[in-house]
Each structure stands twice: as structure tokens, then as C-alpha cells.
Image (cartoon, rainbow, N blue to C red):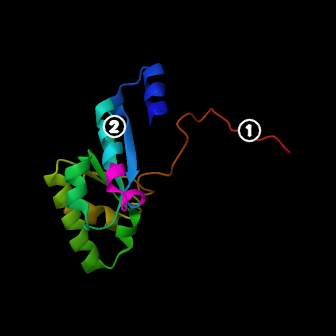
């Protein structure tokens, strides 16, 4: 993280435009480390996103302790059976909004799923429904040398 801070400073990038994804599963067993990372990020002005959220289990305390600007729903939520998915989705959105975080849905590939997320109050969306991933600079080429 210190290297990121140095690079951002070196290139005069405003830290508020940097969002660091923190995968929930990576730190589920080490909440102290997660809190330390979040504290460091906030102290440097970076925004935080809790990534790959699939349930409400432990989410309320994470939202309180980490205070992310964003909660990213894992694409797995879109593949859950309807009754469980709808309940989980509604609860995640409610908890996130109550904590002041925006909710982003990953893996939105159909209008049906997009409409479901809209109805649940999801704020932001990404997925093939909106376009396939592409290079930011299409003229940039990656060349590989033959070994």
C-alpha cells in the first residue's frame, strides 16, 4: 500500500479517485488486518470497496468497522435461487445504504437481473449487459517475444 501511495503522489493523482477493493473472504479470519488496511486507506484518502459480498453474515460489523464507500455484490448472487437471492439482496442493500455505502452489482448479464437489482435499490452495475471489457487505450499493443 505504501508503494501505491508513492505512485499516486508521483503521478499527481487525487487519492479520492482511487478505490481499493478489499475481498471480504480474504480477511474474514483476520478482522484486525482488515481494519488496519481500511484505516491506512482512509488516512491516505483512498476510497474502499468491500468486494465479493455474498451474504449478510458479519456484514453489519464490517460496514461499521471498515466504513467502505462501496459494497460490491459478487456475481454469485445473481445465480442464487430466487427466494434466497431476493432476501439476501434486499438485506445487503439495506445494510449498505444504512452505513452510507453505494452498492455495485457485478456480473449483470441479462435485463432480468438488471431489473431485479434496480428494484432492490442497487446503485451501480457492471457486466456484459453493458458491454464487454475493452482496453482503455486501444492503440496500445501487447507484444510477446517468442522464447
Using the image, tell me which numbered label, if any, was put on residue 48: none
Against 47, residue 116 (above or below) is below
Instruction: Give the quarter of the image for residue 46.
Output: top left
Return the disc, 2 or 1, that comes first in the chain's sequence. Answer: 2
Residue 29 inside the magenta-drawn segment: yes
Left or right for 43, reference 22 = left
Vertical relation: 103 (above or below) 84 = above
Q: Which residues are magenta?
A: 26-34
Quarter of the picture holding the N terminus: top left
Task: Name the side, left or right, on which 8 lies relative to 14.
Answer: right
Taking the spot 36% from the left edge, 44% from the top edge, the residue there is 37
Q: Is residue 111 magenta?
A: no
Q: Nearer the viewer, mark 2 or mark 1?
A: 2
Q: Which dot marks residue 143?
A: 1
The kind of secondary structure element at disc 2 is helix
The structure residue drawn at horizontal position 17% and vertical position 47%, both measured from the top left corner, is 100
- Provide the major secondary structure of the magenta segment: helix
What is the quadrant of residue 74 in the picture? bottom left
As drawn, the residue found furthest toward the left would be 98
**Residue 9 sits above or below residue 83 on the image:** above
Q: Please report the residue visible at 19 percent of the width from the left and 66 percent of the height from the top.
A: 91
For label 2, the residue is: 40
**Where residue 107 sits in the image (x, y, percent)?**
41, 60
Amino acid at each position: 500500500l505504501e508503494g501505491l501511495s508513492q505512485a499516486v503522489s508521483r503521478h499527481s493523482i487525487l487519492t479520492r479517485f482511487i478505490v481499493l477493493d478489499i475481498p471480504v473472504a480474504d480477511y474474514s479470519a483476520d478482522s484486525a488486518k482488515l481494519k488496519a488496511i481500511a484505516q491506512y486507506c482512509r488516512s491516505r484518502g483512498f476510497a474502499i470497496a468491500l468486494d465479493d459480498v455474498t451474504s449478510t453474515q458479519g456484514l453489519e460489523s464490517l460496514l461499521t468497522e471498515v466504513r467502505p464507500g462501496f459494497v460490491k455484490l459478487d456475481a454469485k448472487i445473481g445465480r442464487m435461487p430466487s427466494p434466497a437471492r431476493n432476501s439476501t439482496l434486499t438485506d445487503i442493500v439495506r445494510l449498505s445504504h444504512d452505513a452510507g455505502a453505494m452498492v455495485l452489482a457485478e456480473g449483470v448479464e441479462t435485463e432480468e437481473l438488471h431489473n431485479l437489482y434496480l428494484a432492490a435499490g442497487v446503485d451501480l452495475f457492471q457486466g456484459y449487459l453493458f458491454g464487454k471489457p475493452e482496453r482503455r487505450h486501444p492503440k496500445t499493443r501487447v507484444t510477446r517475444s517468442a522464447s
